[in-house]
Image (cartoon, rainbow, N blue to C red):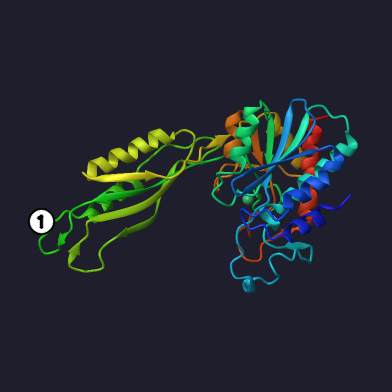
Amino acid sequence: MTSTLTIAQDLIRKASVTPDDQGCQDLVADQLQPYGFRPEFMQFGDVRNLWLRRGAQSPLFVFAGHTDVVPTGPETDWVYPPFSGEVIDGMLHGRGAADMKGSVAAMVTACQRFVDAQPDHPGSIALLLTSDEEGPAVDGTVRVIEALIERDETIEWCLVGEPTSSEHLGDVVKNGRRGSLGGTLTVRGIQGHVAYPHLADNPIHRLGRIVSELSSTHWDDGNTYFPATTFQVSNIRSGTGATNVVPGEAKAQFNLRFCPDSTASSLKEKIESVCREHADHFEIEWSPLGLPYQTLPGTLLSAVEESLCETVGYSPRLSTDGGTSDGRFIAPTGAQVVELGPLNRTIHQVDEVVSAEDLELLSSIYEKVLMRLLS
Ligand SMILES: [Zn+2]
């Protein structure tokens, strides 16, 4: 059996910058086919996805993840070349080491050991891998899930390998993610001379009032698992460049990270009503919505917490913070979704690293989760 570390190194050496998979999924399929996993490649647009299932019975347990990585930036900024997969002092270096080729390797070896020990396990195991998590995420997990729904393949439990840990392996486990709602607001006024303001209508002033009100709005209180909803403006653009001209329009890009106590429609309604209050002419172009999800304590969360505690000796803190993940596409099917992966301190940075020892521990935790749920 190839070690978790070697599989992770082999994956890193394939420069799979999103959405180009570069053969990572073939490598995973080759590793698991001899163990009775049946590979099914699902191509949507430029994106290659892999559905790799062992067994036809329910309940179905799924490891979900991605084989694509974010670009490296200038490779000369890296101490070790980003696609060399070097191991120095117990640390595996390279783009995707932590996000999330290390986890994918851990899933593979966990499945192999589990199948060796329990060849006739009840239920089924599958891996759902996409090469479009770091990109627009429109032809990836979401499309695979649509295909699975179409043919009534129902996921009971899903463990996502995103790097959730903060200081120590498994100190943070995610049992949900906030929703993401964003858009571009354009406020239109009347262009004019700054010395004749009565003949102009300044959209910057109107936009300023809107931003001021929205940024101090109390959206909700959050709940046990979720922090309160937040509103942030990321970009504002306006002005002709001349100092004596009131511009004709002003634009702001904004984003809300929201807790499930608020709904996208209630947030949209509130934003539109604040805009109406301060501007006669405006439009909002909404970006694709990321829905929140939440997995309450239950079979999967217990299995993950117990397996983790048994391996590392401490219990995780449950969290729903950070960006969105592909869990948002899986949870709406009714699946319990939990995320557990290595330390996220260096993800998307130069000199991304992961501890080789942590990858073996992670593999062991994943295996124990399978043991608890499918034996
Ligand atoms: Zn990731």
- Does the numbered disc 1 mark a residue whose Cβ is under 8 Å from ligand 1? no
Residue nearer the viewer, 96 or 277: 96
Q: Seen in the image, is 307 located left or right of residue 223? A: right
Task: Say above or below: 151 vs 370.
Answer: above
Q: Position of residue 182 (x, y in %)?
A: 42, 46
Q: Quadrant of the C terminus?
A: top right
Report the residue at 63% width, 58% height from top. Answer: 17
Task: Say above or below: 109 vs 336.
Answer: below
Report the residue at 65% width, 70% height from top. Answer: 78
Task: Say above or below: 201 vs 291.
Answer: below
Q: Which residue is mark 1?
A: 199
Q: Residues within 10 Å of mark 1 (few under 14, many from 20)?
A: few
Residue nearer the viewer, 316 or 86: 86
Q: Position of residue 237 (x, y in %)?
A: 32, 59
Asked whether the viewer can see residue 159, the reply is yes
The secondary structure type at the circle numbered 1 is helix
Label 1 amino acid? Leu
Report the residue at 63% width, 33% height from top. Answer: 147
